[in-house]
Image (tube, helix red, strand yellow):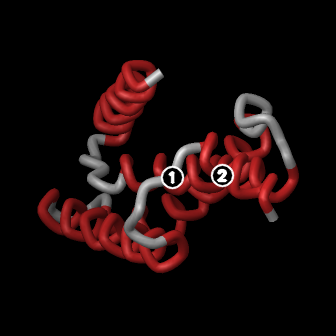
Amino acid sequence: MTGLLYGLMALGLSVIFGVARVVNSAHGEMMALAMYAAALLFSKFRVNPLMAVVPVGAAFFFFGYGLQRLVLRPFVIRPQHSQFLLLLALAVVITSILLIMSGPMPASLTSIACSNRLS
């Protein structure tokens, strides 16, 4: 499963760079945000994590589209270091939001399921 995630991340990075010529340094953080969204759907609504791919994928498609239209498009004509700094800042913001929301301790779906049974 971990290898599959690494492969998907590499595929996403290569497609983004190949098509848009943008080095998206926030790609991993956006993927982590989507994984947290799937875990939240599992913990709150008991949606199977594999079935959560559909609503989370749709939501993050629109999130990415809006991000590209509103934030990234003005930076496409600027030098590449400006794009890189913008996406690096976005990565730091997403990481900080995730740390504030969930804390620094890692959690798996198994531990989330067990904690929900206890409460």
Q: Is residue 16 left or right of residue 60?
A: left
- Crowd class of label 1 (few under 14; some 14 to 19; many from 20; radius 10 Å): few
Q: What percent of the width, then of the height, locates residue 67?
A: 52, 63
Q: Quadrant of residue 78?
A: bottom left
Q: Secondary structure at mark 2?
A: helix
Residue indicated by mark 1 = 107
Q: What percent of the width, then of the height, locates residue 29?
A: 40, 55
**Residue furthest toward the bottom?**
100
- Crowd class of label 2 (few under 14; some 14 to 19; many from 20; radius 10 Å): some
- Comparing 71 with 98, the one in front is 98
- Comparing 77 with 19, the one in front is 19
Residue indicated by mark 2 = 112
Q: Secondary structure at mark 1?
A: loop
- Which amino acid, by three-letter code, is at mark 2? Ile
Q: Is residue 39 left or right of residue 81?
A: right
Above or below, 41 against 119 in this view is: above
